[in-house]
Image (cartoon, rainbow, N blue to C red):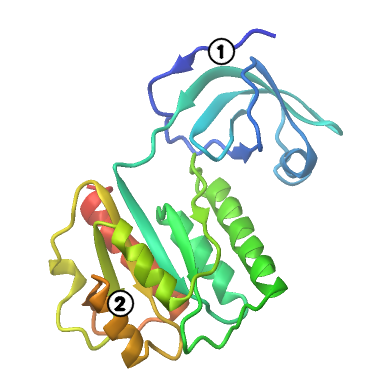
Amino acid sequence: MSSVPTDDRLPERDGAPLFLLDELPDTADLLVDGAEGRHAVDVLRLTPGERVRVGDGRGTVAEGEVVAAGPQGLRVQVSARHEVPPPALELVLVQALPKGERGPLAVELATELGVDRIVPWAASRCVTRWREDRAAKGVARWRAAARAASKQSRRPRVPEVTDVLTTRQVCGALADVDLALVLHEQARHPMARVDLPRSGSIAVIVGPEGGLSDGEVVALTAAGARPVRLGPEVLRTSTAGAAALAALSVRTRWA
């Protein structure tokens, strides 16, 4: 089967469903099988003639038309292939571990709002504790949530979810970002007034339900983070990151 030339234009935002494969063959005919194929056929009930996109979650996207849908999955005739570059400004969310289902919720919201990297953080006042095998399972759940939310929001790149970090490790990682903002309800400076870079990276640090400890505020500030407030309301840890990412995107990406 012949390959399809790469189109240097970005995919149109027309709402066509996106499916993700671990590897995207460079062919004019693609088979979306397994769980993705079953979802396309049994849940979405796609039929021949409908437009879809198939990506690898790393920026490569093939778009085309469904030519067959059945027990084997979804067969797609590719008409264009795109290489979507990473954004000039990377958005990083350092998220203290929320309890229960609020962790995957925070990941889903952040993914839909454009985060590029999510760092689970074991803050001192986190109710949830990831120890030994729980850490691996927790990270796997967050990665699955990021992948699902990427498909729902038609993102060509699935955000990276790192291993869980301690406060010391978070402070060390801040040396690699251009601007670090730690959300704190008692901060004097509103985030809306912070000068933002147009390229590089911005990290948003969100504390746990119990709030940041004084020691964490001191450590993060010493590592270069700027304490800022979002607004007069105190948001839940599972939604604060999404609100901050939306505010940043309005100023840097959505204009």
| Nearest to viewer (mark 1 / mark 2) | 2
Q: Which amino acid, by three-letter code, is at mark 2? A: Leu
At 45% from the left and 83% from the top, the residue drawn is: 208
The x, y position of residue 69, in whole percent, is 78, 29
Q: Which disc is residue 220 wearing?
A: 2
The x, y position of residue 198, in whole percent, is 20, 48
Residue located farthest toward the right when viewing the structure as drawn = 71
User: Which element type, helix, strand or loop, lies under badge 1?
Assistant: loop
In the picture provided, is 169 more to the left or to the right than 251? right
Residue 35 appears in view: yes
At 29% from the left and 74% from the top, the residue drawn is: 182
Q: Which amino acid, by three-letter code, is at mark 1? A: Val
Label 1 – label 2 distance at C-alpha: 49 Å
The x, y position of residue 59, in whole percent, is 48, 35
At 38% from the left and 39% from the top, the residue drawn is: 86
Viewer-proximal residue among 227 and 218 = 218
Packing grade of label 2 (10 A; few <14, some 14-19, many >=20) is many
Which residue lies under the disc numbered 1? 4
